[in-house]
Image (tube, rainbow, N blue to C red):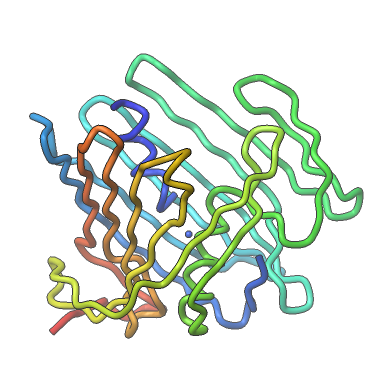
Amino acid sequence: MRRALLFAFALFALPVVNAADLQPFSASYTADWKQLPMSGGTAERSLQAGANGTWTLSFKASMMIASLTEVSTLKDNNGTLLPQTYNFERGGLGKTKKVDLVFDWSTKFITGTDRNDAIKVPLNTGILDKSTYQLALQHDVAAGKKSMSYQVIDGDEIDTYDFRVLGAEKVATKVGSVDAIKVERVRDPTQNKRITVMWFAKDWDYLLVRLQQVETDGKEYNIMLQDGTVNGKTVKGS
């Protein structure tokens, strides 16, 4: 259960994306943990442009018993976003985790530490970290793709994350009703029965507005947009 709570937060925490299509955004979310006595978690996610084509994607989440911070830096290389650094830190729940990675495109290696274990993994174009793949997903959905697959570094291995578009759907958020595209994480049901569904706002650069996760034990977690801005404009529904 503890792992599931943080996993749901970390899913925010969004292989080739045109950097010119990126728009800065910031968003805050509320969290509801059904079947649990506690609720009231919050999360914030933002993408900000920096100097020399560098972007910073940040995610912070907190609840009564845990906190999580995730920061990625990305760079434009002839129109393609490439991860530069990835930092993750989780505290609380009696278990901490810290990950620090550097993507060195000159040597073609990812180096760093994961839970104090040294990491050195070959780096190829298309490999993303656990945060930047979400931007790839966001913009592939905006481009009209119906199925997506990403190579994501996890520890000293490269995992494949698969997704499929389920269709259009209206989402009732705290800023009003939002037209969204519903996307599902594809897993082998014989290996993992967890269900993860996300909704991206069509009129707001496909900003993530809702996430729902159902665990194998039936517990359900919902994270919903509270407020946000995209390229300086306040997100509003109907």
Quadrant in the rendering for residue 119: top right
Residue 200 at x, y = what percent? 35, 71
In this view, the residue farthest toward the top is: 94
- Which of 144 and 92 lies nearest the eye of the viewer? 144
Residue at the spot 67% in from the left edge and 47% down from the top edge: 85
- Which of 70 and 150 lies nearest the eye of the viewer? 150
Give above or below for 161 relative to 154: below
In this view, the residue farthest toward the right is: 107
Q: Quadrant of the C terminus?
A: bottom left
Q: Quadrant of the N terminus?
A: top left
Residue at the spot 58% in from the left edge and 40% down from the top edge: 87
Number of marks drawn: 0
Residue 32 at x, y = what percent? 16, 45
Give the left or right position of residue 179, taking residue 97 as reference: left
- Which of 140 and 102 lies nearest the eye of the viewer? 140
Residue at the spot 22% in from the left edge and 58% down from the top edge: 224
Residue at the spot 41% in from the left edge and 44% down from the top edge: 10
Give the left or right position of residue 92, taking residue 32 as reference: right
Give the left or right position of residue 31, taking residue 62 as reference: left
Quadrant in the rendering for residue 185: bottom left
Residue 84 at x, y = what percent? 71, 53
In this view, the residue farthest toward the left is: 37
